[in-house]
Amino acid sequence: MSPKPKVQKVVLAYSGGLDTSVIVPWLRNNYGCEVVCFTANLGQYEELEGLEEKALASGASKIYIEDLRLEFLTDYVFPTMQAGAIYERKYLLGTSMARPLIAKRMVEIAELEGADAVAHGATGKGNDQVRFELTVMALNPKLKIIAPWREWDIRGRRDALAYAEEFNVPVAATEESIYSRDHNLWHMSHEGGLLEDPWNEPEEAMYTVTTAPENAPDEPEYVEIDFKEGVPVRIDGVAHGPVELMESLNALAAKHGIGRVDLVENRLIGMKSHGVYETPGGTLLYEAHAALEQLCLDKDTLHFKQQVGLRYAELVYNGQWFTPLREALDAFVQTTEKRITGTARFKLYKGNAILVGRKSPYSLYREDYVTFDEDDVYNQKDAEGFIKLFGLPMKVQAMLEIEGLGVSHYRSPDYSNFKRD
């Protein structure tokens, strides 16, 4: 291994869990540097309690704890939702969207503090190491990056607890946590434990956000979500700011058991992992936004946008937020959002968000156009010429095959006179 670079001051992305608590003294012991901790409040709530005392007791010189919930929603979550970005058909990218914001602010604090390095607690097997480090490379490539999990001899919770005890690091937990989790205002993720075998049904005790569908209310509940130019702004006619709106939708959808996803996904680094996600309010927003797109976008734009959503999801998942391609795709998406104004109505019941209505002043759907009655816009006789032209390549191919082979190759063979020897 190459020798460790000289580091004077490092900014650590700090959660207050066992790993990052141990990283503080490890950085001081192995790099002889000052450690400044940074925690982003993205809606993990109770996990923020006591962080300042813990960080300072672990050996940090100071800690920044900043409320980034509004920026998280407006600059990362909503643009990703507007793009229709869903990774591998199910994952609504809750952790993926958070990492570039955390890393961006970590770089800004490093510059403010005059630090020459940043550090994170992501493991060498996961996606987060890539997301953190690509962001640093895009924003300030002069900063050194320290990833302790790729350097140290700690190989598990027992080793980490022993290290914490040796250097008087305050840690609350002494028993191994069954699951690895990530919580923010958009979602809760679960990995490890029973989930390491994808045949196992997740235990109900694992879920921390949503009610089990079978235990959800026995009566359905209706909700209306209003959008203005692609941004959710009202619930049941009442205006909310982004954070309050997200909290309200989370509580409502979670009560009805909505937003659970079980996925075996392809990590960027080449291995598969099994995770369970709880995204209650986000599930409603994705469905509502898609419902308005059905009304307001023309066919070609909607179909192309579906392709954009696939690529956008890959960029976000792979940590490529700060890239020219993501910015270019955003420009396209924001053009489509100018007409996404209207209301979607849902019936929530036992784990299901059932779309029961949508309306928009920009709706391209016209009842008088699709009716079977006569109208001034569409003459049914015109369809004959359209069909003849649309099917012309197929007709020409069939005529040539019949002329040469006697039959179109799409015709099934006739086995009626077939005799076995």
Image (spheres, rainbow, N blue to C red):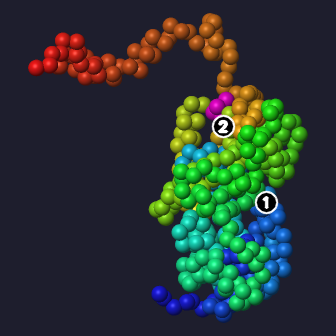
Q: Which amino acid, mark 2?
A: Ala
| Residue at horizontal 71 percent and vertical 32 percent from the top | 354
| Residue at horizontal 23 percent and vertical 15 percent from the top | 414
Image coordinates for residue 122, horizontal then vertical, percent: 61, 71
Image coordinates for residue 91, horizontal then vertical, percent: 61, 50
Tally of marks: 2
Image coordinates for residue 195, horizontal then vertical, percent: 59, 57
CA–CA distance in space, label 1 to label 2: 25 Å
- Residue bearing mark 1: 43
Question: How dense is the environment of label 2, judged by Cα within 10 Å: few (below 14), some, or many (20 and up)?
Answer: many
Image coordinates for residue 421, horizontal then vertical, percent: 10, 20
Q: Regarding mark 1 in the picture, which secondary structure is present there? A: loop
Res 299 → quadrant: top right
| Residue at horizontal 66 percent and vertical 37 percent from the top | 290
Is 249 contained in the magenta span? Answer: no
Q: Which amino acid, mark 1?
A: Gly
Res 410 → quadrant: top left
Main SS of residues in magenta: helix
Q: Is residue 296 in view? A: no
Q: Would you say 61 lies left or right of 134 here?
A: right
- Residue bearing mark 2: 290
Point out which mark residue 31 bears: none
Q: Regarding mark 2 in the picture, which secondary structure is present there? A: helix
| Residue at horizontal 24 percent and vertical 19 percent from the top | 413
Q: Is residue 395 in view? A: yes
Is 294 contained in the magenta span? Answer: yes
Part of the protein shown in magenta: 292-297
